[in-house]
Amino acid sequence: MQAVLEHSPPAGATARTTKRTGFLLLSPSVLILLVWSIVPLVMTLWYSLQNYNLVDPTLHGFAGLDNYWYLLTDPDFLHSLLNTLVLVAGVLIISVGGGTLLAVLYDQEFFGRGIARIMVISPFFIMPTVSALLWKNLMLHPIYGVYSAMMRAVGLTPIDWLARFPLMTVMMIVAWEWLPFAVLILLTAVQSLDGEQREAARMDGAGPIARFRYIILPHLGRAISVVVMIETIYLLTIFAEISVTTAGGPGVASTNLAYLIYSRALLQFDVGGASAGGVVAIVIANIVAIFLVRAVARNLEA
Amino acid sequence: MATVELKNLRKTYLTEEIIKGISLSIEEREFVVFVGPSGCGKSTLLRMIAGLEDITSGDLLIDGHRMNDVEPGKRGLAMVFQSYALYPHMNVYKNMEFGLKLSGMPEAERRAKIEHVARTLQLEPYLNHKPGQLSGGQRQRVAIGRAIVRNPKVFLFDEPLSNLDAALRGQMRVELSALHRKLGATTIYVTHDQVEAMTMADKIVVLQKGVVEQIGSPLELYHHPRNLFVARFIGSPPMNFFSAIFQGGDAAGSSVQLRDGSSLYVPVTSPGLLPGTKVTVGIRPEHVELASSGPNSGVVEVIERLGAITLVHVRMPDGEIIVVQTDGAALTDVDTRVSLTLPPHNCHLFAPDGLAFEACHRHPLAA
Ligand SMILES: Nc1ncnc2c1ncn2[C@@H]1O[C@H](COP(=O)(O)OP(=O)(O)OP(=O)(O)O)[C@@H](O)[C@H]1O
Ligand SMILES: [Mg+2]
């Protein structure tokens, strides 16, 4: 006892030095990360307050909040904001809903399950540009596409999906890319469900639907919220699929916020306006993130 | 209250037969315990009765109706699992309510039932707790409560107490016995705990490698084991064995000669056995008596003093260890030479094929 008491102050001091050394060792990476994220942010903020158009060097100087004003009163901006939300919500509903059903399905024993699992997961490994091209040219092309050939084979006129329903088609392509991710996460979650719990439910007289509704779905709660959070973060910035398939058109029918910023900066060379759009996008992403993190954190605690 | 009957039940996984034709009939209100070494198929058999495993062949009758192809939820059984298998996202009340709700029982009736059961099991203060907020013993009670509210014809238990510490296990054992007396429901209980089997069972079924070795009351198995396996399995510490040569027998007993030349006249019948056959003499540690001199001597190797009793491990000249259970105050010392007295009426005799010879007199408690 005596010995312990005598030794405790030096022990505390050691802990403190260890902690300080830890901070010192961590600081370079923290510093790099800070510079990495802060510098572009500050530059964007700076440009968003400037008159800065690459094709019109005569107009320059401090613009105040003009860029924001033009942006927020631009009907295209509101339209693209709405498109962003529709895209995120639509893809989430399809991928989480479909992912849950597929996860439960692939949890069953059936012949060839291993291969089927690999196949359902594989779209995730195709890069967005490629999968958008695949869909645009191989599947949905009104003349050469597989879908069109199938329609013609039964005597129907194929629809030109990308021209008729541009936003919905983009949504479908993105959902096709993200469904495997949802399946992957949710399948591992389904498999972690205690077998005796399912059996207890069977003994309680629960059929497959009641088991899904009352046992499996609550068990999946956390995994679903993780999928929603991760997907939302990525879906807010969908770009490649739009750029490859519709280029945001016709008009702005399939333009989301990310694509709008791109077209302002690199098609219209309006760096100031694009930066203002970028700042608005950052604000929106953060608002969404705050809500999501709160909801998920609550779910993870329970 | 129901009867359960198994008729030549078999189960094959892929190519391996796990349950090899088990026939058994369970009376109304009976408390039947399945015991056996790990992997012998106890859980599999119980799960076949529950409907969680398919029956490969044979018939399962509950109250005389064939149940082989009836859904688990419709067999009128309730099961308590080793891991309790409570639904983690539902509170205690909802856990108990789940089965009732699915069966379409009206709300008021459900509430009355659950409150009654919660009172019986002293779970009232915890009805709004989630399983994660309960102790092991409380979870166990909830699992039992969930089974009771459904008012099943038969209760199934798969090692329900094995996750509890020793003291709690003892307490729950007594509670379960009392509950069984009160509810009077037919019960099938799987365990590999000797004490649970001996104290709770009306009837014990000893299984080994998918076959029934013996069915009987606890004391019947203790006093009249049918073969070497049951003799070794029931009783703790396990029975001691001596090899011996059969010399001859009559209606009142059989005489055998032990390794050291001493002979023993055991009151068991041995019809048709040829003198000179190798047999095995079995005697429980609590029946061997220690003497300072005489036949069957050996050296004390280990002494375990448990307070009330003392276990003396004696190394015999042929290298075998014989365990003797004596009084807690026994003064024997390690490394001293002792000799063992084997009271003949407590000895069992086993033929070379492992089967026990019929005792001339049944033990009064195992009639
Ligand atoms: N799904 C399965 N597929 C193949 N073999 C199985 C399966 N389930 C159990 N077995 C085999 O059946 C045998 C009996 O298993 P069981 O679980 O009934 O044993 P047990 O008597 O309950 O043992 P324990 O006391 O360890 O719980 C074991 O040899 C096991 O390997
Ligand atoms: Mg088992």
Image (tube, coloured by chain):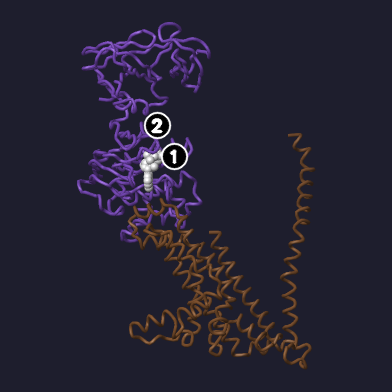
Chain colours: A brown, B purple
> Which residue sits furthest top?
B293
Q: Chain of mark 2?
A: B
The mark nearer the N terminus, 1 or 2, is 1
State whether residue A142 is above or below residue B264. Answer: below
Identify the image quadrant of residue A285.
bottom right
Q: Chain of mark 1?
A: B
Q: Position of residue A251 (x, y in %)?
A: 55, 90
The residue carrying pointer 2 sits among few (fewer than 14), some (14 to 19) or many (20 or more) residues within 10 Å by Cα, namely: some
Measure the C-alpha gap from mark 1 to mark 2: 12 Å
Instruction: Depth check: give the residue in front, A178 or A189.
Output: A178
Indicate left or right for A206 with B23 as reference: right
Disc 2 is placed on an element classified as: helix
Q: Is mark 1 within 8 Å of ligand 1?
A: no
Q: Are marks 1 and 2 on the same chain?
A: yes
Disc 1 is placed on an element classified as: loop
Are the two marked residues, 1 and 2, in contact with CB atoms closer than 8 angstroms?
no
Quadrant location of the N terminus of chain A?
Answer: top right
The residue at 37%/55% (across/down) is A201
Instruction: Depth check: give the residue in front, B58 or A122.
Output: A122
| Residue B195 circle label | 2
State whether residue A4 is above or below residue A156. Answer: above
For badge 2, the amino acid type reads Val
Q: How many marks?
A: 2
The residue at 59%/67% (across/down) is A293
